[in-house]
Amino acid sequence: MRSPDPARTLAAELAEASLGRRIMLEGHVHRRRELSKVSFLILRDRSGLAQIVLRPQDIPVDGIPSEETVVRVTGTVAANTQAPGGVEVVSPVIELLSEPARTPVVELWRPTLDAALPTLLDHAAVTWRHPSQRAKWELTAASLRGFRRTLDSSGFTEIHTPKIVDTITESGANVFPVDYFGRTAFLAQSPQFYKQQLVGVFERVYEVGPVFRAEPHDTVRHLAEYVSLDVEFGFIRDHRDVLAQLHEVLAGMLECVRTESAAAVDLLGVDMPVIPDEIPVIHFTDALRIVGAPDEEPDLAPVHERALGEWALEKHGSDVLAVEGYPMRKRPFYTHPQPDDDRWSNSFDLLFRGLELVTGGQRLHRHSDYVSAIEARGESPSAYAGYLDAFAQGMPPHGGFAIGLERWVARLLEASNIREVTLFPRDLHRLTP
């Protein structure tokens, strides 16, 4: 009767294994080093690297498997201060779990990937295997856990809303049309309408999901599909309550990054941002003055955002800055105006290291205000009947915000291009892989 194989041991667990114990590892061949009297196989699994020592009698008949081949290695734990974790595996038996792998387009065993971004993106399924690439997504995953935990602990309910819709949500943004059983539909630009309606059900909601923008931008900061972290909640006084909740969320995301992806932070040399106890806030008109822009400027240009980021760091020691009171003509129709001057809005953009990361604010909540706002745009309220019905049935004062996940990680790493932190980016030119 066959004796049972030992349970799988992860590379990171080897250091705690008893010397002389027979263990079993599974993973990819990360690197091979063949010397005259002894050879080494470095195995990579999801937890890290393990060193396997091969004497001539341990080498399989077909030779040491090629790099990236998936293998099972059964061997004995031995001490070696030069090996990862101070231990290695000797007297191994190697079993191939896949066909021998073809040579990767990049050498994944090197400490850094010396390849152009198009090469990394074209071969993403393989290049993401590199430890420094994986570390980028580990920061992303930790950020998501921090986002969810912070909101869960504050009484929020996670929701999921349709991504095929019949109405354009964000004014001024292009959409991707979809043939929906003979009718024209669109890929959702945001869950805005749905998350507002669900405030009337749950009071506090959030969603993590893709959004789609058919904007022909070919820049280092734009994607046609990205992950949006959306939050909406009721019974607020104004947009400052929304900003306070955003502060809690960002603090929770950073805390999770620090505590749960510390190894990735160290590997990538992340300069963790400074977010003070209270986010500094300036009015849009003051922002124009600080950057020397004309008073009639309707929005902040990227060069203005960078200048304001430098100003916030110098003036307040903060990597974030909230600019409130954007002109109403530049905000969607559901935005609540500033009560004492309806030229300006009760909304804000949060700049993170000189780049717009978050748009948020207070929404209209009275049905009559929506009717007036839609008619002022020259549209018929009947086109928004399903959306407006919730407000006709009573909705509390509410507001919310949305964080672009890829932008967040790109600025966290101070990456030069948002595609560096996106698993499979979709943009003006890229539809594969």
Image: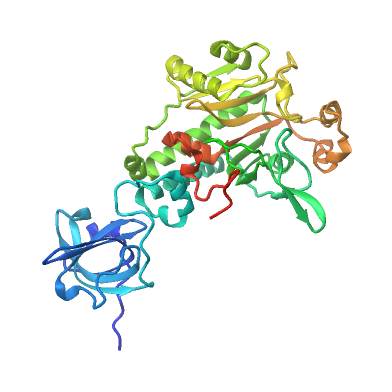
Q: Reply above or below: 235 against 259.
A: above
Q: Quadrant of residue 142?
A: top left
Q: How is the image coloured?
A: rainbow
Along the line of sight, the residue nearer the viewer: 334 or 134? 134
Residue closest to the eye, 412 or 185: 185
Q: Residue furthest bottom?
A: 1
Residue 312: x percent and y percent? Answer: 48, 18
Total number of numbered discs in the rendering? 0
* Image: 135 above or below 305: below
Q: Please state if 221 lies on the left or on the right of 48 as rendered.
A: right
User: Which quadrant of the figure contains the N terminus?
Assistant: bottom left
Residue at x-position 36% and y-position 54%: 106
Q: Position of residue 275 (x, y in %)?
A: 45, 27
- Write the residue at 82% across / 53% down: 183
Would residue 343 be seen by someone viewing this image from the given angle?
Answer: yes
The foreground one among 179 and 376 is: 179
The reply to whether residue 22 is visible in this rendering is no
Image: 61 above or below 358: below
Q: Is residue 77 left or right of residue 113?
A: left
Kindly identify the residue that appears in the image at 30 percent across and 54 percent down. Answer: 109
In the image, 212 versus 139, the foreground residue is 212
Please, is residue 183 above or below residue 211 in the view? below
Give the x, y percent position of residue 19.
17, 64
Image coordinates for residue 299, horizontal then vertical, percent: 64, 21
Corner quadrant of residue 228:
top right
Q: Please report the residue visible at 67 percent of the width from the left and 24 percent of the height from the top.
A: 238
